[in-house]
Image (tube, helix red, strand yellow):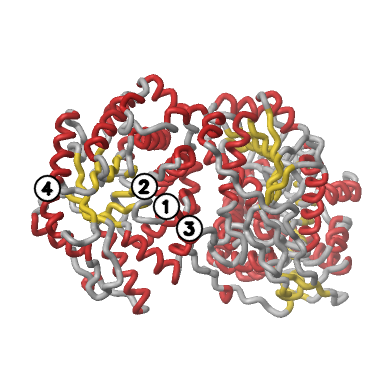
């Protein structure tokens, strides 16, 4: 930050994380049946560092034939995996979790290179949480009879799992850990733009001596995902991503196999008059600028009590001016790059819509690097319920500020959305937290905090944010027969 | 691949600095704080009921949130040139302190020598901001520091407990001033504060500030005894209202002494008070800060919470003794490229 002559007294020098710890090969194959094998048709897909626009490497582009091989490998492995004693499955999962923890720096560097998120977040949030999810579910593997899912919960079989680019390894852990703990085998497709940590996870599975075929990783594009979920050999689909794709998955499957969907959101972060203002401002920042706003549960609609809206917006702008935007590998960077040009274009068009509809736009004064895909933190004030920026998921560092007069109006506005994933409540009054949480139509409600996750706490949405839960015993339910 | 085309739609709007009147309109709890300090205008002293209403009207502090924010800032990576800048800055902010029953003129004189020239092998470094002693040793320090820019700070007002009458507390302060102290570190009456008698706390501070006149007054909140962050914020505002030039975390005699979250809350208070009144109050973190790593974390906090304008010896101080030697060792490590032993720096 350079904002005045006195800053020169204490200017943070660049503190880049060493990238040598995460070597990247020139090319990666698909992971099927415990081996890395080239795609049948030989298709390849480049993956790019969004902060520099440089190509990192190329990965296999799986098509229907590869999907078929992977599903068959998972099927062959499934019976033995399910018959294995729970404590032995647990032992393997613990081993994987330990290896992930041991290689956490490598995974963090890889995640940041491929995704564009700041190393601070991949190092302190993504990777530790991913490890925690595997550790947590490893513990369930020999205790399934006590999860409240019947005396002897049986696995569904082969799970087809499709995950997004915003938290590549974390979403992988959310999907794979409960599936494996309950005796399912998986075919997982990482997002087109962020395949690298999933491939590194495949190496970890090899290192851990996981039986071949229990985990299969297919890199590729939307066609790969479509081929996977429409394959007749699968017994379960778990998807995290956009509501639009979630709908089409549901149409394709038409009830043929069980599905869990974790889709979009337009989270309301509600600030009451008696809120702890400084911490609420931090919560707002974490709610919408964490991971460049590419978080399905982001607190993208800020609902502030009218008497304090000016104080809050002023404090928020002051705080945003201190956010350090730039090289994601720098340990002091707060805001990294947007994952892809497509996503940047979507954010830009919605910001333009906000301006066109008459909301007041403020952007952080942080200068943007010349190369790469960047979006400065943006705050819209004077936003109304009818504005597109108050209704559509932007999935970027863009906050819409609305106001309310009474708790009832706060609830009505918070619930006035097609989504229902997450919400936040900020007040010193405990009884009000409980009352508002009761009235919110959202799968997750945070009180006096935002964007906090734990493997023992089920996560998921209502309404068009999807169904099914991930984490906790509730998350196991999506992978076993309900008897 | 296309180069990024994202541009801000509108030019960034510069923050309009809020006027005091505007702030009060938005947050009436601030009203009593906006005028003259109580030291300047004793007649303005509000009733205890009015003070209580104002202090309780300040926005609350969420303990989980403030600790999380402090932990996040503590993970900043300060290396190479930034570390070198931070080290010399930290040295210039130290109140080199000895507050023991066993203090002697000899001990104080060697501390003063160290304060003026912390590292004889590195004359470009230093001096520190001040030497901090008990009132009876002020004269020794004044003589030892004559002709140097180093201030002589004295603890006073029945330090560290403050459990004495206002008359005794003032006499203690007057002694230190008479001996030539240029800074006074007073303690607040924590008993009165915890009993809700804010008016007494404020009156004592105002009285001591009047005695001090132009001499810098640091008001020690002893946050380890106030226990909650809400109390820390209220005590900070109360001290500033009464006339404190600096608010200070601790005496160093009570655990916990300075912590990052407590200092963060105090830095928010001086930042907001400055926005309201235009008067810049400093912060002093004292007790338990022993390493360069700790010191750099405090500087990051100052930089990102109060802002770079507080990164001066007037804006921020460290009350410490062991810290200086660690800063010297880290500075030598940066210059020499290898670690040095504690044997290579003087004891005091």
Dot 1: chain letter? B
Q: Earlier in the sequence, mark 3 or mark 4?
A: 3
Horizontal side of B208 relative to A355 (left or right) equals left
Q: Quadrant of the C terminus of chain A?
A: top right
Q: Which mark is residue B310?
A: 1
Dot 3: chain letter? B
Question: Which residue lies under the disc numbered 2?
Answer: B283
Q: Are marks 2 and 3 in contact (CB under 8 Å)?
A: no
Q: Which mark is residue B25?
A: none
Which one is in front in this view, the residue at disc 3 or the one at disc 1?
Answer: 1
Residue A28 position (above or below residue B29) = below
Q: CA distance from mark 3 to mark 4?
A: 38 Å
In terms of image quadrants, where is residue B40?
Answer: top left
Question: Which residue lies under the disc numbered 4?
Answer: B101
Residue A318 position (above or below residue A176) = above
Q: Are marks 2 and 1 in contact (CB under 8 Å)?
A: yes
Q: Residue at x 90, y 45 (%)?
A: A254
Q: CA distance from mark 2 to mark 4?
A: 26 Å
Q: Residues within 10 Å of mark 4 (few under 14, many from 20)?
A: few
Nearer to me, A19 or B177 = B177
Horizontal side of A128 relative to A58 (left or right) equals left
Nearer to me, A84 or B126 = B126
Looking at the picture, do discs 2 and 3 lie on one chain? yes
């Amino acid at each position: 930050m350079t904002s005045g002559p006195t800053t020169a007294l204490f200017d943070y020098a660049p503190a880049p994380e060493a990238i040598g710890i995460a070597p990247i090969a020139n090319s990666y194959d698909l992971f099927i049946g415990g081996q890395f094998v080239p795609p049948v048709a030989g298709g390849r897909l480049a993956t790019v560092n969004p902060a520099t626009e440089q190509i990192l490497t190329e990965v296999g582009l799986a098509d229907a034939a590869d999907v078929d091989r992977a599903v068959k490998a998972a099927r062959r492995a499934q019976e033995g995996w399910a018959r294995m004693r729970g404590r032995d499955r647990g032992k393997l999962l613990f081993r994987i979790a330990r290896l992930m923890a041991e290689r956490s720096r490598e995974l963090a560097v890889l995640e940041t290179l491929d995704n564009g998120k700041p190393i601070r977040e991949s190092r302190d949030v993504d990777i530790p949480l991913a490890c925690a999810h595997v550790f947590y579910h490893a513990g369930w593997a020999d205790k399934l009879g006590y999860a409240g899912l019947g005396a002897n919960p049986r696995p569904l079989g082969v799970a087809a799992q499709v995950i997004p680019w915003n938290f590549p390894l974390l979403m992988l852990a959310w999907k794979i850990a409960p599936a494996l703990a309950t005796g399912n085998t998986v075919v997982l497709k990482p997002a087109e733009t962020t395949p690298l940590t999933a491939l590194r996870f495949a190496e970890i599975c090899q290192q851990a001596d996981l039986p071949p075929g229990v985990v299969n990783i297919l890199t590729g594009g939307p066609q790969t995902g479509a081929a996977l979920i429409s394959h007749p050999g699968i017994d379960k689909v778990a998807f995290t991503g956009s509501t639009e794709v979630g709908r089409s998955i549901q149409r394709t499957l038409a009830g043929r196999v069980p599905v869990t969907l974790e889709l979009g959101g337009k989270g309301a972060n509600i600030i009451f008059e008696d809120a702890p203002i400084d911490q609420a401002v931090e919560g707002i920042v974490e709610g919408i600028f964490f991971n460049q706003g590419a978080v399905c549960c982001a607190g993208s609609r800020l609902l502030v009590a009218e008497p304090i809206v000016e104080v809050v917006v002023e404090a928020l702008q002051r705080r945003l001016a201190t956010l350090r935007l730039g090289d994601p590998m720098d340990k002091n960077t707060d805001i990294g790059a947007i994952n892809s040009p497509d996503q940047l274009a979507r954010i830009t068009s919605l910001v333009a819509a906000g301006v066109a509809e008459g909301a007041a736009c403020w952007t952080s004064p942080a200068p943007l690097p010349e190369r790469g895909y960047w979006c400065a933190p943006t705050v819209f004030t004077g936003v109304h319920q009818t504005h597109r920026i108050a209704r559509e998921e932007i999935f970027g560092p863009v906050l819409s500020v609305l106001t309310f007069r009474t708790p009832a109006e706060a609830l009505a506005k918070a619930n006035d959305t097609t989504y229902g994933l997450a919400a936040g409540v900020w007040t010193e009054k405990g009884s009000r937290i409980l009352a508002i949480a009761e009235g919110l139509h959202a799968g997750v409600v945070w009180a006096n905090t935002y964007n906090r996750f734990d493997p023992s706490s089920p996560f998921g949405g209502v309404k068009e944010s999807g169904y099914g839960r991930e984490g906790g015993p509730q998350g196991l339910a999506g992978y076993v027969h309900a008897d | 691949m296309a180069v990024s085309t994202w541009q801000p739609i509108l030019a960034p709007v510069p923050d309009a600095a809020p006027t005091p009147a505007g702030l009060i309109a938005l947050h009436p709890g601030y009203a009593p704080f906006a005028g003259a300090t109580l030291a300047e205008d004793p007649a303005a002293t509000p009733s205890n009921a009015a003070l209580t209403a104002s202090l309780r009207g300040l926005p609350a502090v969420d303990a989980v949130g403030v600790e999380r924010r402090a932990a996040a800032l503590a993970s900043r990576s300060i290396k190479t040139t930034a570390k070198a800048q931070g080290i010399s800055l930290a040295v210039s902010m130290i109140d080199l302190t000895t507050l023991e029953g066993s203090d002697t003129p000899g001990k104080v004189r060697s501390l003063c020598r160290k304060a003026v020239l912390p590292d004889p092998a590195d004359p470009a470094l230093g001096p520190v901001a001040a030497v901090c002693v008990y009132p009876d040793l002020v004269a020794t320090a004044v003589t030892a520091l004559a002709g140097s820019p180093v201030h002589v700070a004295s603890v006073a007002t029945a330090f560290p407990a403050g459990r004495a009458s206002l008359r005794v507390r003032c006499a203690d302060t007057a002694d230190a001033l008479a001996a030539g102290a240029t800074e006074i570190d007073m303690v607040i009456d924590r008993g009165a504060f915890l009993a809700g008698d804010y008016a007494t706390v404020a009156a004592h501070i105002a009285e001591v500030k009047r005695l001090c006149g132009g001499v810098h007054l640091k008001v020690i909140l002893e946050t380890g005894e106030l226990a909650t962050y809400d109390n820390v914020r209220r005590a900070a505002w109360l001290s500033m209202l009464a006339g404190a030039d600096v608010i200070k975390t601790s005496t160093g005699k009570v655990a916990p002494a300075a912590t990052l979250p407590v200092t963060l809350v105090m830095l928010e208070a001086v930042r907001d008070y400055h926005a309201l009144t235009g008067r810049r109050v400093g912060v002093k973190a004292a007790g338990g800060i022993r390493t360069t790593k700790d010191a750099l974390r405090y500087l990051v906090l100052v930089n990102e919470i109060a802002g770079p304008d507080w990164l001066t010896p007037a804006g921020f101080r460290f009350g410490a003794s062991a810290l200086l030697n660690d800063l010297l060792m880290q500075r030598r490590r940066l210059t020499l490229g290898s670690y040095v032993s504690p044997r290579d720096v003087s004891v005091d």
